[in-house]
Amino acid sequence: MHVKFCGFTQLSDIQTATQLGVDAVGLVFYPPSPRAVTPAQAQTLIAALPAFINVVALVVNMPQDELIELADTVPFDIIQFHGDESPEQCQQLASTVNKRWIKALRVNADTDSTASVSAQIDEFAAAGASSILLDAYHQHKYGGTGARFDWSLIPEDSSLPIILAGGLDAENIATTLELPIYAVDVSGGIEADKGKKDAAKMKAFMKAVKRDRWQNATPSEPSNTSS
């Protein structure tokens, strides 16, 4: 299981996540979010990352000229479209800056079914997405709510690798290990406050997910072996 920690604003938190063996870090480029960072802040955070940790740029309905400027300024690896972007818009925007991309789908238990979720995933797969992220629907927010959706709506035969987000923490992550997913994405579940991570929560989350990696390590000393 791969792990993405999202919503970093503090350099010390990035360094802790790196030591714990996180697979990807997410930076939010959506000013209304309390976890948003500027390009200058992002440059400082990314400079602390070693090779092989992917940097994911979360954007929400970002215009093309702004995305081009962001890509020219910030060395991120993957775009996470987290707004109302259509498959065609995602494909066009990502190709403009020559980046791989994922799309967040907000799953609404009142209107969605496994079949409808699967159909939406197929559309983004056809447009060239690398993975799909499933998060909880909120009428007024694009994400970061800490809410969990009905996991029975996750399709078993998705045409894209699924990243699960929404309401995850060290206490409930074990219940996801048998789900048909590729990765988990957490933000609020590892925080002391919005944008400020809690080292103990990050450690507990990684220990719960990467069980093999931690089996010979003490809680205070992460193993140096990969999972």
Image (spheres, helix red, strand yellow):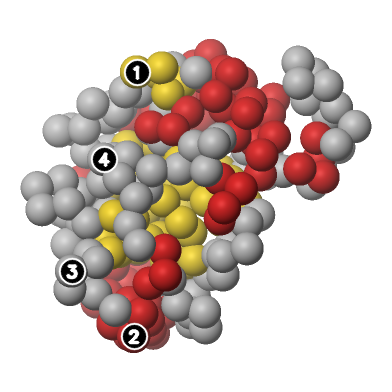
Q: Kindly identify which residue carries mark 1.
A: 193
- Label 2, secondary structure: give it: helix
Q: CA distance from mark 4 to mark 3?
A: 18 Å
SS at badge 4: loop
As measured in the structure, the alpha-carbon distance from the residue carrying label 4 to the one carrying label 2 is 25 Å
* Residue 174 badge: none
Q: Confirm or deny contact between disc 4 and disc 3 (CB under 8 A).
A: no
Which comes sooner in the sequence, label 1 or label 2?
2
Q: Is residue 8 left or right of residue 48?
A: left
Q: Amino acid at mark 2?
A: Ala
What is the quadrant of residue 6 in the picture?
A: top left
- Relative to residue 146, is residue 175 depicted above or below? below
Mark 4 and mark 1: span between their CA atoms? 13 Å
Could you say where residue 189 lies in the image, as x and y percent from the top left? 44, 33
The answer to whether 57 appears left or right of 211 in the picture is: left
What's the amino acid at mark 3? Answer: Asp
Q: Position of residue 174 (x, y in %)?
A: 61, 48
Tell me, for residue 145, which label it has, or none: 4
Number of the front mark, 3 or 2: 3
Q: CA distance from mark 3 to mark 2?
A: 14 Å
Going from N to C along the chain, the mark reached first, 4 or 1, is: 4
Instruction: Classify mark 2: residues with Cα within 10 Å, few (<14), some (14-19) or many (20+).
Output: few
Measured in 3D between alpha carbons, the distance from the residue under mark 1 to the one under mark 3, in whole angstroms, is 30 Å
